[in-house]
Image: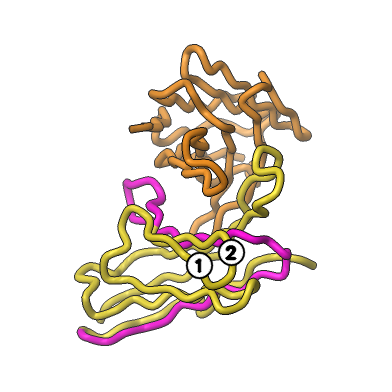
Chain colours: A orange, B yellow
Amino acid sequence: KQEVTQIPAALSVPEGENLVLNCSFTDSAIYNLQWFRQDPGKGLTSLLLIQSSQREQTSGRLNASLDKSSGRSTLYIAASQPGDSATYLCAVGDPYSGGYQKVTFGIGTKLQVIP
Amino acid sequence: DGGITQSPKYLFRKEGQNVTLSCEQNLNHDAMYWYRQDPGQGLRLIYYSQIVNDFQKGDIAEGYSVSREKKESFPLTVTSAQKNPTAFYLCASRPNSSPTVYGYTFGSGTRLTVV
């Protein structure tokens, strides 16, 4: 059974800092990995999707990497801003479930960027 | 703009009452999902549907029911059999084609509280 862990559970940084959020998973045979952002009381917004054959994806100040062999993904946020404050979740797609594509979510890292 | 609309945003249920949460999408996505989110836990899958008139139980389907009469709509009914329904409910969708390319799109959620 796939398990997804995100450490730390919460992180507080001053504005302008570069930071890294971590996601680890127990089964390295994955379909893909997706990073989401969730604001309080809101739904999830997709940030980046990495296919199992890819090593990284970039969007603006965000860069996500994937190392399947070690069961890890990192989300790098450059030059953090107060508007980046949110909970960041990672979700791993199961390759064994065909078109349904079972997904296992982490609990998330709650980020606070202090002005 | 295309997206997923969940309504209502807040819902209060009395003991022994059934309530229905609405989820509508205009993304022309084939697959739709219902997740439950509780504090300190990752999202858990309740039901999913890959095509119209077909749906499958997820990991925590007991006490819930769904229907998929139209491609655009996937309502979730929380029945009186669900003993602990207070949670944040999220609807998501994804196209069946090219599953390795597309990730999830989520709605903004419905917060259900038992009173």
Amino acid type of the residue tagged 1 in the rendering: Asp
The image quarter containing residue A104 is top left
Q: Is B73 one of the magenta-colored residues?
A: no
Magenta stretch holds residue B44: yes
Identify which residue is drawn at 76% across, 34% down. Answer: A59
Query: Horizontal and vertical percent for residue A16?
Result: 67, 29
| Residue positioned 37% across, 73% down in the render | B65
| Residue B28 visible in this rendered orientation of the protein | yes
The numbered mark at residue B51 is 2
Q: Residue at x 58, y 38 (%)?
A: A35
Q: Nearer the viewer, residue A55 or B72?
A: B72
What is the quadrant of residue A55 in the picture? top right
Q: Are marks 2 and 1 in contact (CB under 8 Å)?
A: yes
Q: Amino acid at mark 2?
A: Ile
Instruction: Answer whether residue A42 is visible to the viewer in this image.
Output: no
Q: Which quarter of the rendered picture does the N terminus of chain A lie within? A: top left
* Residue of label 1: B54
The part of the chain drawn in magenta is B16-45
Residue at 40% x, 54% y: name it.
Answer: B45
User: Label 1 marks which chain's residue?
Assistant: B
Q: Secondary structure at mark 1?
A: strand
Q: Which mark is drawn over residue B66?
A: none
Same chain check for tags 2 and 1: yes
Query: In the rendered view, does B58 fall on the left or right side of A109?
Result: left
Q: Chain of mark 2?
A: B
Label 2 residue SS: strand
Alpha carbon of mark 2 to alpha carbon of mark 1: how far? 6 Å
Instruction: List x then y, in percent, for residue B64.
Output: 33, 71
Where is residue A54? Give x, y as percent.
68, 22
